[in-house]
Amino acid sequence: MAVIDIIKSILSPGRSLDARPRVGTAVSDRSVRPLTRSHLRELVQVNSRCFGPGDGYTKYTFEYLLDDPRSLSYRIDDDLGSMAAFAFVMITDSGAGHLTTIGVLPEYRRRGLAAGLIRHVERALASRGTVTLMLEVRVSNIEAQALYRREGFVVVQRINRYYNNGEDCFLMMKTLFELEK
C-alpha cells in the first residue's frame, strides 16, 4: 500500500516532477554569492530557462557585464549548489544603480529569491554611496511589477517600444537613502 501512496503523491496535481531539493523562502546575505566568469556556462543555461526567446541576455552580454568593473553580479544556489537565481546591476556614470537583469528559474519562483537578490543589491549599492536604483520592466509583466512595487519601486516613466518586439516598458525607481541609516 505504501508504494501506491508514493505513486499517487508523485502523480498528484500540483506536484513538480523535478526531484531536486527546493530553496527555502528565507534568503540571507550568506546565501547570496558573487557571480564570476567561472559561472558563465551555467549562467547562460539558467538565463535561457528564465526568459523566453529573444528576452534574455546573450553569452557575450554576460561576458561584458562580468568583466565590467561598474557591474555587480550575484547568484543564489539551490541545495545542490546549482544556480537557482541571479541578478546584475550596473553603477552608471551618474552614480545610480541600474538593475539590468534578474532571473529566477521557474521551479524556484514565488519563494522570495528575487526579493532577496534585490535587497542584497540595494545594500551593496548603499554601501558604495549609491542612493538610487532603477530598472525597466515590460508593461505586460504584471507579476514583476507587483514584486518591484512591494520592494518600494515606483513607476516614473513609460518608454515606448523599448523591447525588440516593440513592447513598451515602465522605468521604475527607488531611493536607497533609507538604507544608509
Image (cartoon, rainbow, N blue to C red):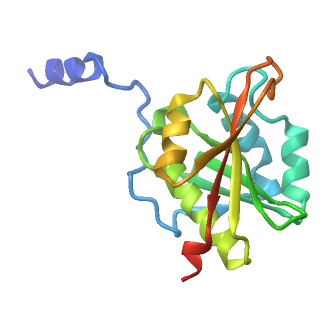
170, 58: nearer the viewer: 170
70 relative to 164, above or below: below
In the displayed structure image, the side of residue 28 where residue 128 appears, left or right: right
How far across and how far down the image is residue 157, in percent? 71, 40
Q: Quadrant of residue 3?
A: top left
Q: Residue at x 67, y 58 (%)?
A: 74
Q: Residue at x 76, y 38 (%)?
A: 44
Q: Is residue 80 visible?
A: no
In the displayed structure image, the side of residue 143 where residue 64 appears, left or right: right
How far across and how far down the image is residue 149, in percent? 51, 46
Count of marks placed on residues: 0
78 relative to 16, above or below: below
Q: Is residue 12 visible?
A: yes
Q: Quadrant of residue 61?
A: top right
Q: Residue at x 78, y 63 (%)?
A: 96
Q: Residue at x 15, y 22 (%)?
A: 5
In the displayed structure image, the side of residue 71 where residue 30 appears, left or right: left
In the displayed structure image, the side of residue 99 where residue 123 appears, left or right: left
Outermost residue, bottom direction?
181
Q: Quadrant of residue 94?
A: bottom right
84, 110: nearer the viewer: 110
How far across and how far down the image is residue 150, in percent? 46, 49
Q: Quadrant of the C terminus?
A: bottom right
147, 32: nearer the viewer: 147
How far across and how far down the image is residue 99, in percent? 71, 51
Q: Quadrant of the N terminus?
A: top left
